[in-house]
C-alpha cells in the first residue's frame, strides 16, 4: 500500500456543514483563528511535502499501518461471519488518537505555534498530545476534569512524565465536557500563540473535517489490508464505538460515501440503560442543539441545558456526537446502536479470553455489539471491528467493578 | 428609535458613557437577584440579565459560579421569564438578555424572543453566535422587536467587523481582551484600536465589556472612545464577598462620566 492520502469527501460544505450539522458557534474572538486554521489545513493537505512528512511519522513514529488481524477463535466462538480486528490498539500510545495528534501537531508547527492545548477525558488524547508535543518540542497544557483526574491517575502521571502540564477542571460535571469548555476558554485567551489540538470529530469547523481526514487512515488501511487478505476491499460490515466519534469516522468515512457500501455500525454507550437517563447515547436518545461550537445531536433537558453523560468508559462519556455522525444517522448511511456498561464489560472479557487482546472499554462496546450481530451472519461474510485502543488503562477500573459485583 | 439606542443618547446628553451592569438571573437566589437588580438599575442606563447555561464557554470563573448556583436552584428559561417580568415592572431602564444559543434553540427561537419581548426585554446578546452562522436567529429577534447585540474582539478582522455590524441593530459589544469575562485591573491598550476600527465601519454605539472592574477601567474605556461600559464579574464578586455591588457600580459610573 502506498500510504495515507487526503481523500475528497462530499461533506462538509464550505461553511463546515454536514447537512444542517456542524458550523462554527464560538465567541467571535476565535473566528479569525478558525479561518486561519482552515486556510492552513487546506494548504497543507495540498502540499506533497506535508503529506510525505505526515506519512513518515505515521510509519516510523506511530507504527502504521496497524495490522488487520483475523480473529479466528472469536469467529469460531460467535459462529457466524469471519471477524477481523483493526488493531489501533497497537499504534503508539495505545490508541488511534495519535493519527490525529501527529497531523495537528505538524500543522501547529507549520503555523509557527509553540504552545498547544487539549482537552482529555480518560486521558488517551491527552497522553497522545503530550507525546507528540514532547517529540516536536512544543509546550503542552492538558485540561482534564477533576473527576477524571481522580479516575485516571496513571494517565495524569504519564502526561506529566511527557512534560505536559495537566490542569484539573472543577466546573460543571468535572468531566470531558467541562475540560473542553476550559480548553476553549484558554484558546480564546491565548489564541495568538496557541494551537488547540481537539481530540475528536466535534467542535467548530474545521475540526470535525480535519480530524476525520487524519483519522481516515484507519479506513484506508482496512481497505488495503482486506484486499490483500481476502481479495476484496469492502467487508460486509464495520463496527466501531462512538463517543465524539473519531475512531468510527476514521473507519467509516472511506466507505460511507460510495457503493458498494458495507453495513456501518456505530455503537454508542447505553450506560446503565437508555431508559435510566444514565447513558451517553446522543443519537439514540438526544436532541439536536449546539455545544462546543457545533450543531449536533446532544443530551439535554427541555430547557436546552446540557445533561450529564454516563458511561463506564470515560472516553465515551460525552453528551454530544460529531456533526458528521449526526448527518450519517439522518441519511441512514450508518446504523447506530447502543450497548450497556454491562454488555461492554462482557465484550471486554470476551476478547481477552478468546484472542488474548484486552481492548479499551470504549472498543469493548464495539466487541459487545459484534457478539450480538456476528452469529446472525453467514460464514462467508466478513466483519471488521475497530479496536480503537488497548485496555491496560482500564484494567484497574474493571477489577474494581467486577470485584463489587462479587 | 429603539429604547436601547435612546438609552445611549440619554446617557450622552447627561455627560456620561452608558453604564450597563450585568447580573446572572437567579443569583444568589431569585429573590435576592431581584433586590440587587432593582438597586443597581437606579445607577444604570441599560441592564443586562443573564439566563444561566450549563456550559458558558465565554465566561470566566465568577460568572461560571453564578450560573451554576442559579441552575442548582432550578432557574431555567421559564423562571428567568418570570424574573424579567418582575424586574421590568420595577424599573424603566431597558433590559437586555444575555444567554447562549442552545437554550434559545431548545425553546424555539421565534417563541423565545417573542416571550422575552413580552416580558420586557428590549435587546439580546448571544456570545456564542457569530451572527452569519445562523442568520435566522437575528431575524427572529428583530421580528420580535428586539435590538440585536453581537460581540467583536481585538482579533476581529475588518471583514468580520463589517459582517457582524451588518446584523447589529442595538450596539456593538467590544470585548476588551482576548479572553473570557472577568474583572481586570487594567484594560489592554489595543482596545482603543478596536473601537476606532469599529467606528470607521458603523454609526452604532460601541460598549466595552470584559475586564471592567471599577472607576479606573471605566475611565480607560471612556478614553478609548466607548459609548458605554458593561460590568458583570466585579458586581457578582462583590455579592459573593458580601459587599455592596452598588459601590462598584457607582465607581464605574464615576469613571464613565465625561
Image (cartoon, coloured by chain):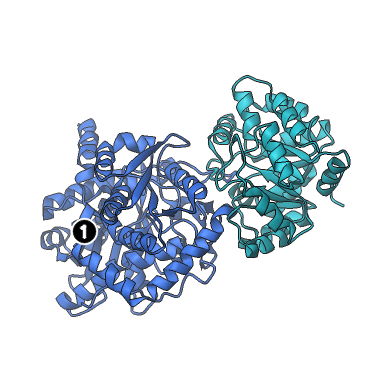
Chain colours: A blue, B cyan
The residue drawn where x is 61% and y is 38% is: B52
Q: Is residue A310 above or below residue A251?
A: above
Instruction: Please tell me how crowded label 1 is: few (under 14), some (14-19), or many (20+) other residues with Cα within 10 Å.
Output: many
**Residue A55 at x, y percent in the picture:** 26, 70
Specify the farthest residue to the top.
B242
Disc 1 secondary structure class:
loop
Residue, disc 1:
A91
Disc 1: host chain: A
In the image, taking residue B117 as reference, residue B104 lies left or right, namely left
**Residue A263 at x, y percent in the picture:** 33, 69
Which residue is at the front of the view, B8 or B49?
B8
Which residue is at the front of the view, A207 or A275?
A207
- Is any part of residue A236 visible from this angle? no
The residue drawn where x is 24% and y is 45% is: A345
Which quadrant of the rendered structure holds the N terminus of chain A? bottom left
| Number of callouts | 1
**Residue A333 at x, y percent in the picture:** 41, 69
**Residue A403 at x, y percent in the picture:** 20, 32
- Using the rendered view, name the quadrant where residue A332 is placed: bottom left
The residue drawn where x is 48% and y is 36% is: A172
In the image, taking residue B46 as reference, residue A402 lies left or right, namely left
- Is any part of residue B195 visible from this angle? yes
In the image, taking residue B196 as reference, residue A331 lies left or right, namely left
Which residue is at the front of the view, A38 or B191?
B191
Which quadrant of the rendered structure holds the C terminus of chain A? top left
The residue drawn where x is 77% and y is 28% is: B38
Q: Is residue A402 above or below residue A234?
A: above
Amino acid at each position: 500500500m502506498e500510504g495515507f492520502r487526503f481523500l475528497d469527501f462530499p461533506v462538509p460544505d464550505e461553511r463546515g456543514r454536514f447537512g444542517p450539522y456542524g458550523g462554527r458557534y464560538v465567541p467571535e474572538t476565535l473566528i479569525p483563528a478558525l479561518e486561519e486554521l482552515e486556510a492552513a489545513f487546506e494548504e497543507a493537505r495540498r502540499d506533497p511535502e506535508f503529506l510525505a512528512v505526515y506519512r513518515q511519522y505515521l510509519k516510523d513514529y506511530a507504527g502504521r499501518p496497524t495490522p488487520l488481524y483475523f480473529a479466528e477463535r472469536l469467529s469460531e466462538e460467535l459462529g457466524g461471519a469471519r471477524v477481523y480486528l483493526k488493531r489501533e490498539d497497537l499504534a503508539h500510545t495505545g490508541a488511534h488518537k495519535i493519527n490525529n495528534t501527529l497531523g495537528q501537531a505538524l500543522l501547529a508547527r507549520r503555523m509557527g505555534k509553540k504552545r498547544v492545548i487539549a482537552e482529555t477525558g480518560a486521558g488517551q488524547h491527552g497522553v497522545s498530545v503530550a507525546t507528540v508535543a514532547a517529540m516536536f518540542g512544543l509546550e503542552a497544557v492538558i485540561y482534564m476534569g477533576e473527576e477524571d483526574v481522580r479516575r485516571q491517575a496513571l494517565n495524569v502521571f504519564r502526561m506529566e512524565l511527557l512534560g505536559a502540564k495537566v490542569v484539573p477542571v472543577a466546573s460543571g460535571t468535572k468531566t470531558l465536557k467541562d475540560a473542553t469548555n476550559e480548553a476553549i476558554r484558554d484558546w480564546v485567551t491565548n489564541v495568538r500563540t496557541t494551537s488547540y489540538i481537539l481530540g475528536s470529530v466535534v467542535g467548530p469547523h474545521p475540526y470535525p473535517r480535519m480530524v476525520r481526514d487524519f483519522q481516515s487512515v484507519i479506513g484506508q488501511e482496512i481497505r488495503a489490508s482486506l484486499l490483500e487478505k481476502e481479495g476484496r476491499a469492502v467487508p460486509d460490515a464495520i463496527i466501531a464505538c462512538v463517543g465524539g466519534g473519531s475512531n468510527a469516522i476514521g473507519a467509516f468515512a472511506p466507505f460511507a460515501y460510495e457503493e458498494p457500501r458495507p453495513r456501518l455500525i456505530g455503537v454508542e454507550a447505553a450506560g446503565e440503560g437508555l431508559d435510566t437517563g444514565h447513558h451517553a447515547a446522543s443519537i439514540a436518545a438526544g436532541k439536536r442543539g449546539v455545544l462546543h461550537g457545533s450543531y449536533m445531536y446532544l443530551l439535554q433537558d427541555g430547557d436546552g441545558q446540557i445533561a450529564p453523560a454516563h458511561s463506564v468508559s470515560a472516553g465515551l462519556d460525552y453528551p454530544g456526537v460529531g456533526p458528521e455522525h449526526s448527518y450519517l444517522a439522518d441519511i441512514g448511511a450508518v446504523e447506530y446502536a447502543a450497548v450497556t456498561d454491562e454488555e461492554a464489560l462482557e465484550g471486554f472479557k470476551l476478547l481477552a479470553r478468546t484472542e488474548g487482546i484486552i481492548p479499551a472499554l470504549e472498543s469493548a462496546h464495539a466487541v459487545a455489539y459484534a457478539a450480538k450481530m456476528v452469529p446472525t451472519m453467514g460464514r462467508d461474510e466478513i466483519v471488521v471491528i475497530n479496536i480503537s485502543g488497548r485496555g491496560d488503562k482500564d484494567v484497574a477500573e474493571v477489577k474494581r467493578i467486577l470485584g463489587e459485583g462479587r | 428609535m429603539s429604547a436601547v439606542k435612546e438609552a445611549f443618547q440619554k446617557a450622552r446628553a447627561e455627560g456620561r458613557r452608558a453604564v450597563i451592569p450585568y447580573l446572572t438571573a437567579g443569583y444568589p437566589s431569585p429573590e435576592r437577584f431581584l433586590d440587587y437588580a432593582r438597586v443597581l438599575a437606579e445607577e444604570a442606563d441599560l441592564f443586562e440579565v443573564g439566563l444561566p447555561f450549563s456550559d458558558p464557554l465565554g465566561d470566566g470563573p465568577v460568572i461560571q459560579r453564578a450560573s451554576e448556583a442559579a441552575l442548582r436552584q432550578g432557574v431555567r428559561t421559564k423562571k428567568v421569564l418570570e424574573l424579567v417580568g418582575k424586574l421590568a415592572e420595577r424599573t424603566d431602564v431597558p433590559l437586555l438578555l444575555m444567554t447562549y444559543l442552545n437554550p434559545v434553540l431548545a425553546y424555539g427561537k421565534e417563541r423565545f424572543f417573542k416571550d422575552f419581548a413580552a416580558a420586557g426585554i428590549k435587546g439580546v446578546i448571544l456570545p456564542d453566535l457569530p451572527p452569519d452562522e445562523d442568520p435566522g436567529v437575528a431575524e427572529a429577534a428583530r421580528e420580535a422587536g428586539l435590538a440585536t447585540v453581537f460581540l467583536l474582539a481585538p482579533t476581529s478582522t475588518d471583514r468580520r467587523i463589517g459582517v457582524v455590524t451588518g446584523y447589529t441593530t442595538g450596539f456593538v459589544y467590544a470585548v476588551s481582551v482576548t479572553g473570557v469575562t472577568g474583572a481586570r485591573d487594567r484594560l489592554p491598550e489595543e482596545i482603543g484600536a478596536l473601537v476606532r476600527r469599529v467606528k470607521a465601519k458603523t454609526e452604532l454605539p460601541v460598549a466595552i465589556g470584559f475586564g471592567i472592574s471599577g472607576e479606573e477601567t471605566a475611565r480607560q474605556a471612556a478614553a478609548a472612545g466607548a459609548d458605554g461600559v458593561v460590568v458583570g464579574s466585579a458586581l457578582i464578586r462583590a455579592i459573593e464577598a458580601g459587599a455592596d455591588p452598588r459601590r462598584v457600580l457607582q465607581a464605574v459610573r464615576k469613571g464613565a462620566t465625561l
